[in-house]
């Protein structure tokens, strides 16, 4: 089985750039997705195919990839971006989530 | 727009069974593979199971293999998860997903004596 590793927490001040990383061998072969989850809510897709934003996701969200690591960048983070973020990938129809990163914007 | 509504959660004793349902609308259900994930209280997301468009190809996480069964009824635009031999560690919110891009609001499963 595959494993995706994320930092447990990231903290930035409003207006700063937040970067959340996700590492795993599967990421050299498969794209990653990123989900945002606010407390008590369902996950929301914020990035797919590594760097593509679904409609409705602000352009301050971007994604990049290098080797076994993908990065979700929030440029000019806002208070409303405070949430848990999960990376996700799949191979042979089996999915795997990273452990999640709590983003604090304070 | 995409709408996924889970139901069937509840309180069940260890060793018991539950059948979760997910009613889909707003998209062509039979065109998409579907997924179940869950979230234990205070924990992260866990991928559980996959089913392809026609329902003849499925995949399970090791943690539920042999106990859970995913199925779908394209005519009813519904996804199911039959959960048997439930354990305390199966407690959590269960979400159904259209592919891996949209999720329902989840249904709570509590396994406790």
Image (tube, helix red, strand yellow):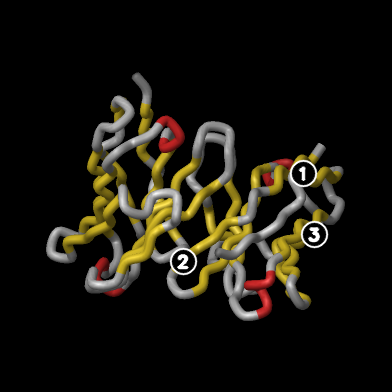
Q: What chain is tagged by disc 3?
A: A
Considering every residue shown, the one lying at the far top of the view is: B113
Can the viewer see residue A57 in this picture?
no
Taking the spot 84% from the left edge, 45% from the top edge, the residue there is: A12
The alpha-carbon separation of the residues under discs 3 and 1 comes to: 17 Å
- Identify which residue is drawn at 26% across, 44% down: B20
Residue B42 % position (x, y): 58, 33
Residue A53 higher or lower than A10, as above or below: below
User: The residue marked by circle 2 belongs to what chain?
Assistant: A
Looking at the image, residue B55 sits to the left or right of residue B1; the answer is left
The crowding category of the residue bearing disc 2, from other C-alpha atoms within 10 Å (few below 14, some 14 to 19, many at least 20), is some
Give left or right: position of B109 versus A41. Answer: left
| Residue A76 vs residue B47, the one in the foreground | B47
For the view shown, which residue lies furthest in the bottom direction?
A: A29
Q: Earlier in the sequence, mark 3 or mark 1?
A: 1
Decide if residue A55 is on the left or right side of residue A106: left
Q: Are marks 3 and 2 in contact (CB under 8 Å)?
A: no
Q: Which SS class for mark 2?
A: strand
Which residue in the protein does label 2 denote?
A94
> Residue at position x 34%, y 69% from top?
B33
Query: Which is in the foreground here, disc 3 or disc 2?
Result: 2
Q: Residue at x 81, y 54 (%)?
A: A18
Q: Is residue B100 above or below residue B90?
A: below
Q: Residues within 10 Å of mark 3 (few under 14, many from 20)?
A: some
The residue at which mark 3 appears reads as A75
Residue under pointer 1: A9
């Amino acid at each position: 089985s595959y494993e995706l590793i994320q930092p447990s927490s990231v903290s930035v001040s409003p207006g700063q750039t937040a970067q959340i990383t996700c590492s795993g061998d599967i990421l050299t072969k498969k794209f990653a997705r990123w989900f945002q989850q606010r407390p008590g809510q369902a996950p929301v897709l914020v990035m797919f195919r590594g760097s593509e934003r679904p409609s409705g996701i602000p352009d301050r969200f971007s994604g990049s990839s290098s080797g076994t690591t993908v990065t979700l960048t929030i440029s000019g983070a806002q208070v409303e971006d405070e949430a848990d973020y999960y990376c996700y990938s799949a191979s042979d129809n089996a999915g795997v989530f990273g452990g999640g990163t709590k983003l604090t914007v304070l | 727009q995409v709408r996924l509504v889970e139901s069937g959660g509840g309180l069940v004793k260890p060793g018991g069974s539950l059948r979760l349902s997910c009613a889909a609308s707003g998209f062509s259900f039979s065109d998409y593979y579907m997924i179940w994930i869950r979230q234990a209280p205070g924990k992260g997301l866990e991928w559980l199971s996959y089913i392809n468009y026609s329902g003849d190809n499925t995949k399970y996480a090791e943690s539920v293999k042999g106990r859970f069964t995913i199925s779908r009824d394209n005519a009813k635009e519904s996804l199911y998860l039959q959960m048997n031999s439930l354990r305390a560690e199966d407690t959590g919110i269960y979400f159904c997903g259209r592919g891996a891009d949209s999720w329902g609001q989840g249904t709570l499963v509590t396994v406790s004596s």
